[in-house]
């Protein structure tokens, strides 16, 4: 894991996730925010979006699955690495995570906890590939604690976190940070 990425996440456990231009503009004004998850854009403008984040002194992490025009193939990671200054990527596709790591990008492997099959598939090999695992929804402290112990790696809780109680529960359960598109959470 790139130490500067880990340090940025740990230095402020609130990660801003932006899903549109208005959210991006608001988060860029928040001096205490250090990491921005970019959850929108398209192949024609992702470089400019990343540059705005970088120009504000923040760490830019692009969610590969949500950028219009990019595929789930590893070549999409090559594009992000070559044509943007992104610090890392988020993806639900393990091959993209592996490729990003090969390209020295920080990696966040996003997992949706929808049933026990997802839990059964989680294993320590994820540690060899991803720097951090993001668990969605982030409102399940028991699952955060269990997965944190099972994988023995940093966990981010994301999705549906809406108040201080949710943030504290996730952090108390072992998450190193939370990610949220909720502007109220950004200001905590």
Image (cartoon, rainbow, N blue to C red):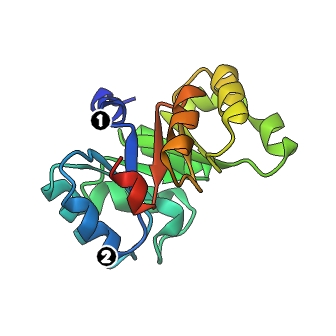
Residue beneath disc 2? 22
Q: Which mark is residue 163?
A: none
Instruction: Tell me the distance, in whole angstroms, between the alpha carbons under discs 1 and 2.
Output: 23 Å
Q: Nearer the viewer, mark 1 or mark 2?
A: 2
Circle 2: element type: helix
Tag 1 near tag 2, CB within 8 Å: no
| Residues packed near mark 1 inside 10 Å, few (<14), some (14 to 19) or many (20 plus) | some
Residue beneath disc 1? 8
Circle 1: element type: helix
Q: Position of residue 21 (x, y in %)?
A: 32, 76
Q: Is residue 109 left or right of residue 80?
A: right
Asked whether 81 or 53 is in front, the reply is: 53
Residue 115 appears in the figure: yes
Asked whether 31 or 92 is in front, the reply is: 31
Name the residue at 66% across, 20% down. 149
Q: Is residue 174 left or right of residue 44?
A: right
Q: Is residue 71 left or right of residue 78?
A: right
Question: With respect to residue 99, does 44 lie above or below?
Answer: below
Name the residue at 27% across, 47% down. 33
Name the residue at 46% across, 62% down. 76
Q: Position of residue 165 (x, y in %)?
A: 54, 42
Residue 124 appears in the figure: no
Q: Earlier in the sequence, mark 1 or mark 2?
A: 1
Task: Locate the N terminus and report the quarter of the image it occupies.
Answer: top left
Q: Position of residue 130 (x, y in %)?
A: 53, 36
Name the residue at 36% across, 30% down. 10
């Amino acid at each position: 894991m790139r130490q500067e990425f880990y340090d940025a996440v740990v230095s402020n456990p609130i990660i801003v996730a932006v899903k549109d231009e208005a959210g991006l503009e608001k988060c860029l004004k928040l001096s205490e925010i250090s990491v921005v998850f970019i959850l929108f854009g398209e192949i024609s403008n992702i470089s400019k979006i990343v540059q705005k984040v970088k120009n504000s002194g923040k760490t830019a992490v692009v969610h590969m699955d949500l950028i219009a025009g990019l595929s789930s193939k590893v070549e999409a990671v090559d594009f992000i690495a070559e044509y943007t200054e992104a610090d890392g990527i988020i993806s639900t596709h393990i091959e993209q995570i592996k490729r990003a790591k090969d390209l020295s990008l920080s990696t966040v492997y996003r997992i949706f906890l929808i049933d026990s099959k997802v839990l059964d598939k989680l294993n320590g090999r994820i540690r060899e590939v991803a720097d951090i695992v993001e668990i969605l929804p982030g409102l399940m402290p028991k699952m955060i604690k269990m997965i944190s112990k099972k994988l023995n790696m940093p966990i981010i809780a994301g999705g549906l976190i809406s108040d201080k109680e949710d943030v504290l529960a996730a952090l108390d359960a072992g998450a190193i940070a939370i990610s949220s598109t909720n502007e109220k959470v950004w200001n905590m």
